[in-house]
Image (cartoon, rainbow, N blue to C red):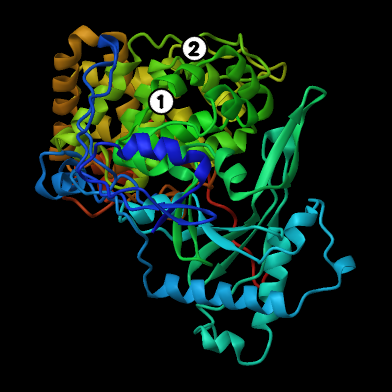
Amino acid sequence: MLIITKRVQSAVQRLVGGSKRANLLSPSSSCGFFVTLGCAPASIKAHGASRTQGPEPRRCPSIYSHQESCWPLLASYSSARACQNSSCQEMADHEVAGKIILDEVEETLKKLLLDVAEFIEKNPLPSEAETSAVLLPDELKKAPLELRFAGGWVRDKLLGTPSHDIDVAINKMTGEQFGERLKEYLDVPGNAERYGLGDAKKKAGSLTKIEKNPEASKNLETVTTKILGLDVDFVNLRKETYTEESRNPVVEFGTPEEDALRRDATINALFYNITTGQLEDLTGRGLSDMKNKIIRTPLEPYTTFKDDPLRVLRLIRFASRLGYEIDAETKKFMGNEDIRKFFLAKITKERVWTEFEKMLKGPDPRRALSIIHELDLYRTIFIDPANPKLYEPDTKNWAEAYNTWHDLLDDGNELASTLVKSKDECFLSWFLASMIPWADAPEPTPLKSGKIPPPLATQVAVAAFKPPNHVLNVLTPSIAHLLAIREIKDRREKARDSLGMAIRRWGASWRSQVIFAMLYEIYTEPGKKADILAHYSEFMAHITSLGILDAHLFKPLVDGTALAKALNAKPGPWMKAALDVVMAWQLRNPDITDPAAAIEEVKLSDVVDTSTLAPPAKKQKKGQS
């Protein structure tokens, strides 16, 4: 059942007025009104995009949890993304549920939390022990303890999407206070076993306190733990008051309505009150926006984004994940210059990366990039905040790159299936697509030491969102080998040894580097896209036919020690070049396993002058003269 406060009653009446699918609005209690909403299948509204950004992707509501990414490739990618697919069409027509139905684990968690609440009410701590940086108003001190499942879990539950993350909002205790009492309750002999928590895999984990950081627009302190295999966060309902003198808010205990209005989107402001069993839409728009596939802010957008500019990225992520439209008024302020300045000044690079990574691992990375492009947010996200004029990337043809890559993946194209072999490679390919406008940046100035710093693309990625090293270790060689990949592809190189040795030079991420080179060419010469794709298809097909897709993993027929012994030479720096000669010979002679001819090849090369080298002297045994 849904509870809507009197303050939003009129909005609900407007919403359901005249609708044959809505029951009559009826008063139920002094605290609010109840209404049951039946939801008709919502049509997918076409996303307005400029011609530059290309055709809007076919999209359907996410049928994956947020942990899923770039599904088991690549035929699955195609079938899961195309809304003509029967299973996907069924999801597109799926109605938003009108009530919350808990599974067995969630029911157990609910019972546990309600029992803890009862335990707290019956065993209150002395007031002096209930210390908190957040002041509890007098009117709440005598109120009953209420618990609500909040935010994304409620949204996903209504969409029929599994979620293993649950936020528990508490009306009169901080998350830390409730977490400590939960721990106290479970320490009572026999209590943990009542909920199946005797099993080490299901028992409640330790409490982790996540401190607030107002300077980074993280204004709420939370406590997180793992219970019954679920990640559970405890936090108090809050309101935030801003003053002219400070950009950081005063955080206080708030009402459920105040808490809902401070959230990033109406669809994320829904509550499931486990104390009453009611579904609560306290903004008056959450359920209707879900029904109509709309993302909007509960308050006017400028205030919402000013309070926490990271919400700009969060809304893009939800739009791309769910296939929803961002409300026009909300969208207008996402690209607002003031909000851009707040974003650059307040948001930490780690928080930016968390959101951006989720976009690229979500069901529709192209949609996320297209919204960033449409709202001119590239210069907000892909920038060094400390050096904004380092380079001005040109995004004019960027859409040609990410649209092409989407289409290749979406069609289950053979080229794409050769270039991408895992979910992580799929994610990395989208990251590289996002960095294409930085490929044209000038080479960095050498340091005084003579050392060449990383490419500007790598430098700005670190400054903007600090991706992990395994991501940077793909971006950097993609820039470094860009020209080499294009050159060997353009000359239609056929020799197995030349191609194999090039792959070994490019390293383990060479296929990702080829993706970057291909998308860069399309970005720079979009009119030649068909020819570019044909040439790269031919290039990869030839490499496949030669059996050298994994050339970077090939082992030499002879190792360095054995080679030095065969050459009667001392081990030394020459060995690397000599082993390359061995490997090139192997690539020319894939059916021969005897290394003798390869060793002769080394002798005939100029990588080692064996006439000047002698084997190391043998150590004499004791007693020998």
Which one is in front, 315 or 599? 315
Q: Position of residue 237 (x, y in %)?
A: 64, 51
Residue 180 occupies quadrant = bottom right
Which one is in front, 463 or 471? 463
Q: Position of residue 127 (x, y in %)?
A: 86, 67
Picture quarter with the N terminus: bottom left
Q: Position of residue 219 (x, y in %)?
A: 69, 41
Q: Position of residue 59 (x, y in %)?
A: 23, 35
Element under label 2? loop
Residue at 70% x, 59% y is 172
Element under label 1? helix
Image mark for residue 434: 1
Q: Residues within 10 Å of mark 2 (few under 14, many from 20)?
A: some
| Residue lying at the far bottom of the rendered structure | 190
Q: Is residue 354 above or below residue 533?
A: below
Tell me, yes or no, if residue 576 can be seen here: no
Q: Is residue 369 left or right of residue 257?
A: left
Q: Which residue is mark 2?
A: 441
Residue at 57% x, 72% y is 113
